[in-house]
Amino acid sequence: MSGLRRRTRSMAKNVYFPPTWKVSKSGIHQSIRFNEEDYSLRAGNQITDSENHVRGRDGRYHEGGPFYTSRIDYGGVNPTVSLRVSNSEGNYQYDGPVTLRPLPSQLNEWFGENTEMKHRSEDTSDLDPDGAVAISLVSPANPNTNLATTVAESVKEGIPSLPGIQSWKQRTNVAKAAGSEFLNAEFGWLPLVDEVNEVVKAARFHKLILNQYHRDEGRNVRRDFDFDIEHSSKAMKEGVTLKPRIYASSGTFFNVALGTWDTSGVRTRTTRKWFVGSFTYGTAHQSDSWRRALGFGTDADALYGIALSPDILWELTPWSWAIDWFTNAGMVVNNLTNFALAGQIMRYGYMMEESIDNITVTATSRGDNQVKRGTVATYEANSVSKVRRPANPFGFGLTGADLSPTQVLIAAAVGISLL
């Protein structure tokens, strides 16, 4: 993970193993113990990678960089036992703790799978698909896509066709020339008034939603999403027996002294993943079509709420505005639709994962070889990892080279650095 500072730590657990006494057949007592530096059992290690936070061009620290930590440790109860065993070489006496340290091959056999504890991969790109799913589920309804849909509806619901709008001038002129008789032209004048009012309403609504879109630019909408916790558990095979070990001569294990122990165990894995992010959107309206759309809404205001007569309609209507608005609105919809893929942006977005892997084996003495029946010893291995993977403002798994010039400009427009 480039750009991160690595720290490693070894976790040693000091366990004092007293000497094993060997009494030869001639009666000579010999203390057998290993070198003192071997008294510390290697109890695991931890690796941590975290990014040093640096000041951005705005003078503030950019928080929430990539983070990775993975820890493996081994533990368990080490009961003190007293025993005396005889074999062909003489008598062995021991009074001290035992340690259950099954070999990896034993664990694999007992659980029927690879149970070796491993650090989580430092390559966290496997979280990118989950991040994409989370974004699709919790991001605010894309303001650009919704805006395009809403504007499109404003230009099609109950609005006459473009040829119909083009006939307005002539139809108004006919009604005006008819004088008072136009009032009786139910199928001429009143349908025209309805058509004009529909377009007026659409143009005003069109203007309002575009202004609202403009006002909401740059506002932050925070979202989070928790994936279902993944949990699995697998029991150890039944009927497994082992002989716990103690340290003896030259640091080797003295395996035979503690008799037979019945074992049971379980391996559990738990993984939690979650996403947090803050969404906003940039500007899509740096175009003449956008500004014209707002102007047409202003023209429509002049007619809104007026009881139309042929004279009023003739005097107040610059006839080109309705035709221009109708065609211009289509351009706005097209621009917004094309912009939707680039318009939504995250001020921050993170996928996080915490995984816990645990193996616990419990051994109970049968009471042979002078070990008290029912004596319990345990072996435990734990692996805990925590990672945080930051998103690009436009999603996970993207680099600056993957972004279009439009996306780069939008990020700059809302004050987000891609460095």
Image (cartoon, grey):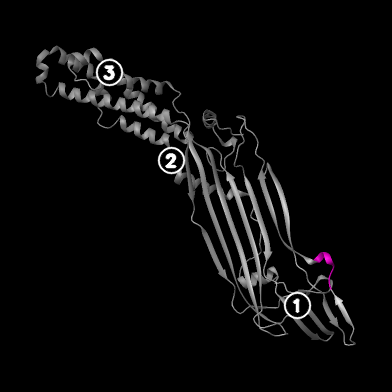
Start-end of magenta stretch: 33-38
Find out whether residue 32 is within the magenta segment.
no
Residue closest to the eye, 380 or 121 = 380
Report, in whole angstroms, how far the alpha carbon at label 1 lies from the one at label 3. 98 Å
Residue at horizontal 59 percent and vertical 34 percent from the top: 418
Residue 343 placement, left or right of 68: left
Report, in whole angstroms, how far the alpha carbon at label 2 lies from the one at label 3. 35 Å
Residue 270 placement, left or right of 153: right
Q: Secondary structure at mark 3?
A: loop
Give how far across and how far down residue 345 sits, in percent: 50, 36
Q: Is residue 327 above or below residue 273?
A: above
Q: Is residue 57 above or below residue 386?
A: above
Q: Is residue 23 above or below residue 139?
A: below
| Residue, disc 3 | 302
Amino acid type shown at disc 2: Pro
Residue at horizontal 45 percent and vertical 28 percent from the top: 284
Q: Secondary structure at mark 2?
A: loop
Report, in whole angstroms, how far the alpha carbon at label 1 lies from the one at label 2. 63 Å
Give how far across and how far down residue 108 sits, in percent: 64, 69
**Circles 1, 2 touching at the beta carbon (< 8 Å):** no
Find out whether residue 34 is within the magenta segment.
yes
